[in-house]
Image: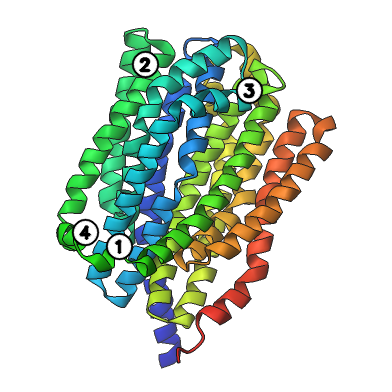
Amino acid sequence: MADAGRSWATNSAMNRAILAIALPAMLTNVATALFGLADMWVIGQLGDAAAQGGVEVGARLLLALLTIFNFLRSSTVALTAQAAGRGDEPAQAEVLVRALAVALAIGALLLAAMPLVVPFGLQLLGAHGATAELARAYVDIRYWSGLPWLFNAVLTGWLIGRRRVRAVLGVEVAANLAHVALDVALVLGLGLGVAGVAAATLASETGKLIALAAIAWREEPAKRAVAVARQPRTWSLAALGGLLRLNRDLFARTVLLMGAVMLLTRSGAEQGAVVLAANAIIYQLFMLSALMLDGFESAAQVLCGEALGARDRRRFTRLVRALLAWGGAAALLITLAYAAVGAQLAASFSTAPAVIAEVRAHLGWMVLLPVAGVASFVLDGVFIGSSWTRAMLQTMAVALVGYVALLWLGRPLGNHGLWLAYALFFLLRAAGQLTLLPGLVRRSFLPRV
């Protein structure tokens, strides 16, 4: 009985720890999703498919460009959580300083490459005519939000790694409320159209950076940042090498993931402006569900990273099972909600009858995708928190090959074939991760000699 009581208490504490991170992270991610949803809703009120397609193409280009650097957040969460598991505050300060330096270097390179990246990216996405012109107008403004976005990724990851998820949530909510207000004022109030949508994003991203920096600066390890930056060991090849190897794998994995998203966008663009606009709405609502489920990915990154840092294999394996169970339950609830109100929700994002009809014809995929993707989302968090980034990259590469093959095989099915391939892509990723998981756990928790 005593053992059963201890086991219940342990499981109860673990579930509370998961939800204490996952729920605020979920709300934070929902607030983040408001960026894309607000943009799509506001521009949709103009009833112009070309403008809606232009924002979709421009946003997809910048999403692809910046999300490949999302390793800044993921690696910062993992390394900070592992240092926290060891009780090492100086190491947490070093993680912050190194990650900010990498973000600054990447931002400088992106700004220098802007004259080449923008025209190439728009051409790659297959936009043409009025859609291409409006996409270019959008990107020319929003591109300047890249550097604040990179710094925000680092600061968000560092605060989450220290379990300051509620503080991050507060900033995200405030920034997104400001973004929605600016969207409405600039687009519907001042009539700035696509340029107004881009300017709203630039302003809100900059405001978020100021708020996150103020919160991080009050954390004890961050107060050591200036001193740590002056220490030679912070910039030693060994210290930088570990960070860069982790970031290299995460970067390559994210490139592959965004390649899959760009294939989705390009395949939709090839079918015309109406299909492109409809797919943009379906994708934005899928991203809303994915960002909610990513709350459990964030919990996995932090808690599995802490367990690995503490060398506690039993806690680690219990966490993986519990995270998959909670994620699966949340995915089922989202799927049921989309089945009930998805049609009405999707229809509110456009006033163009042809776009609404196209969305309704493919609504089933929006309902299915949360369940199809949840295991891969949670396992991403487990792999990142454990620094198993090379294995995650390998599973992503195999899944992408399968996805490309499925896109080709599904061409006779039209847009349904496109969404079928995308759903199976997530299942392939999860299958690969589950196959490698037992061996990775055994190797990572071998006794140290």
Badge 1 amino acid: Trp
Label 4 crowding class (10 Å Cα cut-off): few <14, some 14-19, many 20+?
A: some
Q: Looking at the picture, how far across and down is residue 328, in whole percent?
A: 57, 57
- In the picture of the structure, the residue carrying the numbered disc 1 is 235
- Is residue 163 something that shows in the picture? no
In front here: 333 or 163?
163
Q: Which mark is residue 196?
A: 2
Label 1 crowding class (10 Å Cα cut-off): few <14, some 14-19, many 20+?
A: some
Q: Residue drawn at (42%, 66%), measured in percent from left and top?
A: 242
First in residue order: circle 1 vs circle 4: 4
Label 3 crowding class (10 Å Cα cut-off): few <14, some 14-19, many 20+?
A: many
In front here: 375 or 267?
267
Residue that extends furthest to the top in the rendered view of this protein: 191
First in residue order: circle 4 vs circle 3: 4
For the residues labelled 1 and 4, the Cα–Cα distance comes to 8 Å
Indicate whether 419 appears above or below 179.
Answer: below
In front here: 343 or 116?
116
Question: Residue 132 sits in which quadrant?
Answer: top right
Q: Residue drawn at (46%, 47%), measured in percent from left and top?
A: 292
